[in-house]
Image (tube, grey):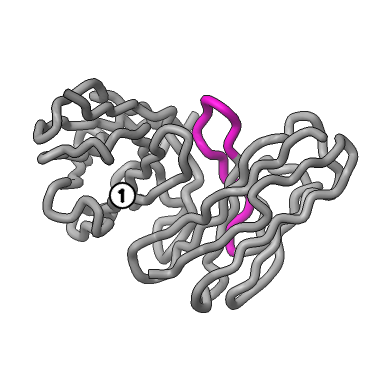
């Protein structure tokens, strides 16, 4: 069964840091681009960051550029996002999501259950 | 950045009814790289439609997508109780940022 399992969320003070992880199973992890998508409480979905299967290409939303770093360890089938200089507006459920196909643009066919990040003093 | 505007914000319908959800893009979505997702409370989004009109694996045929360019539609032909949820469109073309619409809530009338 294809699965994504996020971890690492929690309460952090403004200006603090947090690293989220997403453990993948049931597919050839290194072949697929992955992304982080977040959802603030009661709000819609916002794409945050993406990474190619090899890890050689990374992409960011303007709202997190320079503060968040996406990475992956294909030997561990794990996706990460390092979040620095956190702000109250970063408070959200963070989902990792798998691209549906190996090549070319595609939708997210598999999502994790999400991990909650709360930025508050 | 491509802005996606979904309408209506809320759709109140009865089970068995037909739902028509709209997603309008601020510029043409290349190669119909447009997806629809369903999200229920406390759950992650689920892919319904990709490529504007292709159903994802396991999605019932009462869900259908259509459109191209800047105007896209998700139709649910006969609403089942489990279909009451929030629906999001997303464009995933060749450039970032990938963007989502604001969502349409389909609620029981």
Determine the image quadrant of residue A27. top left
Residue A47 screen position, x and y as percent: 37, 51
Span highlighted in magenta in the image: B39-51
Q: In this view, does B2 lie above or below B44?
A: below
Residue B41 falls within the magenta-colored stretch: yes
Label 1, secondary structure: give it. strand
Q: Is residue B24 left or right of residue A61?
A: right
Residue drawn at (58%, 37%) of the image:
B39
Q: Which residue is drawn at 16% across and 23% down?
A: A121
Q: Mark 1 lies on which chain?
A: A
- Residue B71 image position (x, y, % from top left): 64, 71
Instruction: Depth check: give the residue in front, B11 or A19.
Output: B11
Q: Is residue A89 magenta?
A: no
Residue at x 63%, y 74% (from the top left corner): B68
Mark 1: few/some/many CA within 10 Å (<14, 14-19, 20+): many
Horizontal side, residue A110 vs residue A59: left or right:
right
- The vertical placement of A74 against B43, above or below, is below
Q: Which percent across, then down, holds residue B66?
A: 71, 66
According to the picture, the residue beneath numbered tag 1 turns out to be A48
């Amino acid at each position: 069964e294809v699965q994504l399992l996020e971890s690492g969320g929690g309460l952090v003070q403004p200006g603090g840091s947090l690293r989220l992880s997403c453990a993948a199973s049931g597919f050839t992890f290194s072949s697929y681009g992955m992304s982080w998508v977040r959802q603030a409480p009661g709000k819609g979905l916002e794409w945050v960051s993406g990474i190619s299967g090899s890890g050689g290409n990374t992409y960011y939303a303007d709202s997190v550029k320079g503060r968040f770093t996406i990475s992956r360890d294909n030997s561990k089938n794990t996706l990460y996002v390092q979040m620095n200089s956190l702000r109250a507006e970063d408070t959200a459920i963070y989902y990792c999501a798998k691209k549906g196909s190996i090549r070319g643009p595609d939708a997210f066919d598999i999502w994790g259950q999400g991990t909650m990040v709360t930025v508050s003093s | 950045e491509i802005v996606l505007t979904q309408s209506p914000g809320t759709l109140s319908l009865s089970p068995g009814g037909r739902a028509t959800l709209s997603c309008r893009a601020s510029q043409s979505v290349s190669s119909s790289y447009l997806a629809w997702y369903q999200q229920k409370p406390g759950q992650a989004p689920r892919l319904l439609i990709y490529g504007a009109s292709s159903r994802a694996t396991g999605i019932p045929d009462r869900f259908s997508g259509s459109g191209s360019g800047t105007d896209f539609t998700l139709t649910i032909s006969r609403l089942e109780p489990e279909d009451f949820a929030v629906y999001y469109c997303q464009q995933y073309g060749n450039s970032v940022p990938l963007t989502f619409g604001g969502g349409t809530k389909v609620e029981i009338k």
